[in-house]
Image (spheres, rainbow, N blue to C red):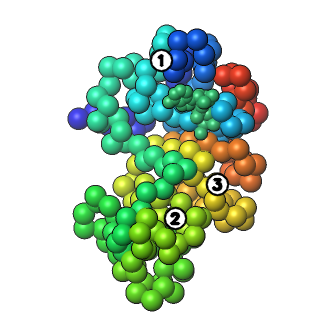
């Protein structure tokens, strides 16, 4: 199975609409180099999540192409492509089990030190270690015993623990306060060094950690950095 770890991602003149008459992306072109942290900004409804969904292969462009290295995404095995990607959305799904199970979901034999390392990156280890049963503490229905920001950090840890080649955070730090969001993004970008990180946000506090910044407006990206 081909691993798409070291390939440039390009959108080339992509047009996309969900319904017949409303174009969300018009002649949209963007290069995301490998091994860099790219931030996508833009107001709500500007099409940021649509770009992510197209990149994940959830939708196909009406015209134009998305390439991964020299391959057209449409010709790439979606399974092998998604295996390379750690994806975190704004919506978090936690289940009634331990913090450890919620993070390691679907990944077997996680070394405890590695789990703690990941949780330190998302500034969660101290809180977990101070919880009554540490990493075995049960989070309640849909993570009810955790704050919104803690739930989001569990969700980011869940993506990181799979050691993805590409990490996509779509408004995944929206519930974190400014200082923690900034620290978490900084830690993540450091640990993903040499890999590709795409951060979708409308918050300015993560910008200082980015290699490239694009602002999306009317379906067009403007390069800010
Ligand atoms: P952002 O993530 O920047 O807030 P989105 O990509 O979610 O923006 O949405 C861009 C536009 O596409 C919005 O106008 C939104 O209403 C519309 N849209 C998003 N998802 C769908 C969908 N599944 N069906 C129809 N329209 C959608
Ligand atoms: Mg969105």
Position of 114 relative to 59 (above/below): below
Q: State whether residue 185 is above or below residue 118.
A: above
Comes first in the chain, label 1 or label 3 = 1
Q: Is residue 114 visible?
A: no
Quadrant hosting residue 222 = top right
- Whether tag 2 and tag 1 are in contact, CB under 8 A, the answer is no
Q: CA distance from mark 1 to mark 3?
A: 28 Å
Mark 3, residue position: 174
Q: Residue at x 61, y 42 (%)?
A: 200
Compared with 58, 205 (above or below) is: below
198 and 42: which is toward the camera: 42
Foreground of the two, 186 or 103:
103
Residue 141 in which image quadrant: bottom left
Q: Could you tell me how far apart the alpha carbons at marks 3 and 2 are, in whole angstroms?
A: 11 Å
Label 1: state its secondary structure: loop
Task: Write down the residue under mark 1.
Answer: 61
- Mark 3: few, some, or many residues within 10 Å (few <14, many ≥20)? some
Q: Which residue is mark 2?
A: 151
Q: Say whether residue 207 is left or right of residue 22.
A: right
Quadrant containing the N terminus is: top left
Query: Mark 2 vs mark 1: which is more N-terminal?
Result: 1
Q: Which mark is residue 97?
A: none
Secondary-structure class at tag 2: helix
* Label 2 crowd (10 A; few <14 / some 14-19 / many >=20): many
Q: Is residue 164 left or right of residue 145?
A: left
The residue that appears at 55% across and 14% down in the rendered structure is: 15
Residue 54 seen by the camera: yes
């Amino acid at each position: 199975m081909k691993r798409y770890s070291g390939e440039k991602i390009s959108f080339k003149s992509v047009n996309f609409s969900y319904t017949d008459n409303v174009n969300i992306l018009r002649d949209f072109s963007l290069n995301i180099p490998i091994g860099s942290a790219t931030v996508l900004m833009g107001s709500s409804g500007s099409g940021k999540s649509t770009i992510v969904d197209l990149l994940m292969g959830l939708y196909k462009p009406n015209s134009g192409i998305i390439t991964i290295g020299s391959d057209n995404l449409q010709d790439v095995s979606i399974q092998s492509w998604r295996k390379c990607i750690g994806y975190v959305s704004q919506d978090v799904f936690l289940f009634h089990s331990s913090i450890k199970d919620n993070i390691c979901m679907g990944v077997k034999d996680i070394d405890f030190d590695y789990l703690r390392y990941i949780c330190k990156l998302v500034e969660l280890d101290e809180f977990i270690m101070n919880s009554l049963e540490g990493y075995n503490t049960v989070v309640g229905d849909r993570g009810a015993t955790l704050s919104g920001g803690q739930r989001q950090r569990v969700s980011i840890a869940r993506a990181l623990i799979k050691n993805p080649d590409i990490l996509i955070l779509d408004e995944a730090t929206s519930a974190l306060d400014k200082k923690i969001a900034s620290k978490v993004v900084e830690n993540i970008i450091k640990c993903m060094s040499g890999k590709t990180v795409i951060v979708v946000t409308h918050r300015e506090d993560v910008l200082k950690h980015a290699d490239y910044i694009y602002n999306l407006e009317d379906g067009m990206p403007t390069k800010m950095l």
